[in-house]
Amino acid sequence: MKPATDPHSYAQPAEARVKHLQWKAMVDFDHKIIRAVATWTIEVNANADLITFDTKGLSIEKVTLNDNVAAEYRLANNDSILGQALAVLLKPGTTQVSITYQTSPDAEALQWLSPQQTAGKKFPFLFTQSQAILARSWVPCQDSPGIRFTYDAEVTVPKDLLALMSASNPQAKNETGIYTFSMKQPIPSYLLALSVGDIAFKSISDRSGIYAEPSLVDTCAWEFADLEKMIAGAEELYGKYQWDRYDVLVLPPSFPFGGMENPRLTFATPTILAGDRSLTSLIAHELAHSWSGNLVTNATWDDFWLNEGFTVYFETRIMEKLYGKDYAEMLASLNLQGLHEEIKSLNEAGLSADTKLKLHLEGRSPDDGVTEIAYNKGYYFLRTIEEQNGRDKFDQFVKDYFSQNAFKVMTTEEFIPFMKTYYQEKFSIALADSLFQDWIYTEGLPSYCPKPVSDRFAKVDAALAQWKAGNAITGSTTSSWSTHEWLHFLKNLPDTLSPGQMTALDELGKFTASGNSEIITAWGVIAIRNHYEKAYPKIETFLINTGRRKFLMPLYSELIKTPEGKKRAVSIYSKARPNYHFVAVSSLDKLLKQ
């Protein structure tokens, strides 16, 4: 099958492509650089005399072929999004290319944290974020989701610290500071990951456990006690887990995402440590990626929905299996509310084309496609097919989709005939072309989008209606509400509230005092909109100490709607920016016009 053309990579895999990486690296915290040799085993097509790698901000010291034969190479002009192509001239019989290099102190994938930015305050910390196209800023690679490779690594770090990768991992520090890793299953470059810090491990089951800073590891292990149940539940649904182990690393708070599905080692934000296990659906989401995304991967970032739509669907099914239908429907309801808000926001920004599932991101950062559309419009498209034709049939399809395409890539244009053929041959069901057109290639949401039904949310709606009619809500009504019920309540309040109403609501829900990041964000937006000054110090502290883009964007976006709010936003951002990862900074610089 001809590889899909990837507008976000300089690689020419039809000519020569990478198959295995041997990476030898030394992590230098003093200079905030990694010095490394990347030795690639390559596959070269007949007559090809060139292999092209993606790089960004790397200092290339030398390039050699096979047995240390010096190679001719050239770095192309720099592109602000894509970086520089590294073209290496091959000789007949070349099977290996070794690149000796070092990273830049401001490499976009690397987040170097001072001891002060960690929980323990004693040691520095490093983590990577390679998705979507940032792997090229720390490893010269063919940085396309459509190109897979295996890897081995030897990483030297300061002796007080532990190194972990998206591979086989140690569970304790050694005396040498030298750690070795192996990833035998082929992965795309965006799933390359490294973290170095004062990290401890706690086992959950024979094949799963939690890594975190020592002061947090017990808290994290308690929060994620259902990890093994999630893995077993996922396997019952859609087949064997194919990555040997599933561990979770809880990172310091500057991590820009909720989680990152690095194979064998999910990176997770501490913002899901709610103290009541209410936000662990994020772990179910990252676990689901072990099938959708890691096992069957979008060929290009224009097909991102194939990763995320399936993952949200799978995550929701895992949560339903563990905690019941009504719990899963609460999650689905919140997702639908977020999806409507995203569509409105994109339309107002003149980006209505981005509300299609199939994107066209050439010339733009693929991070522009990381919206609710890929995740939740994708989920509701798949849910539509399930509801229209039966869950048993859809489950059979998904299981076979994963097994038949394991360790392969998929484009939207390949997916559609695959699904149509499957349903026709297995079930004699003809899926209509209009179904795919309505969801994948049309802006917005079809009128027949499923509407989740939650009894628990219906009770919240009844309480809210009483409140809007002028009746106070008592603590006895809300005492059993979960995070999800409170979020539903907050998101359905009127836009404009009086000072008295704000005070009464805060007394009811204790929102300003909350330690739950989802609640703080939802309440923070309401507080900013209604000039509730009591919450301002909490919002500022939260923005300075939280790096997750999901929470930063709505709060800063609400702040800049007024001149005084914009002034406050810029002031907070000047303090907070050093704590944020490049992924968050690139979005916020644009928002705040820095």
Image: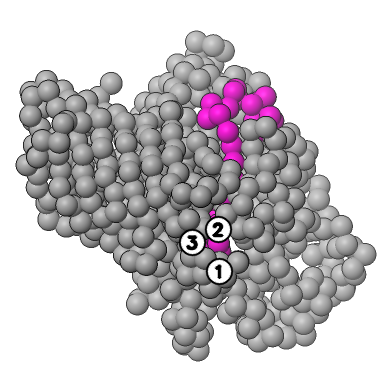
Tell me, yes or no, whether the two marked residues, 2 and 3, touch with CB atoms within 8 Å: yes
Q: Give the x, y percent position of residue 366.
A: 35, 51
Q: Which mark is residue 122?
A: 1
Q: Is residue 209 left or right of residue 25?
A: right
The residue wearing badge 2 is 198
- The numbered dot on residue 125 is 3
Is residue 289 part of the magenta span, yes or no?
A: no
Residue at left offset 75%, top offset 50%: 222
The one of 433 and 175 positioned closer to us in this rendering: 175
Per the image, label 3 sits on a secondary structure element best described as strand
The secondary element bearing badge 1 is classed as loop
Residue 483 coordinates in the image, percent (x, y):
74, 58
Q: Amino acid at mark 3?
A: Phe
At 46% from the left and 51% from the top, the residue drawn is: 177
Picture quadrant of residue 29: bottom left
Q: Position of residue 277 (x, y in %)?
A: 74, 52
- Which residues lie in the magenta part? 231-259
Q: Nearer the viewer, mark 2 or mark 3?
A: 2
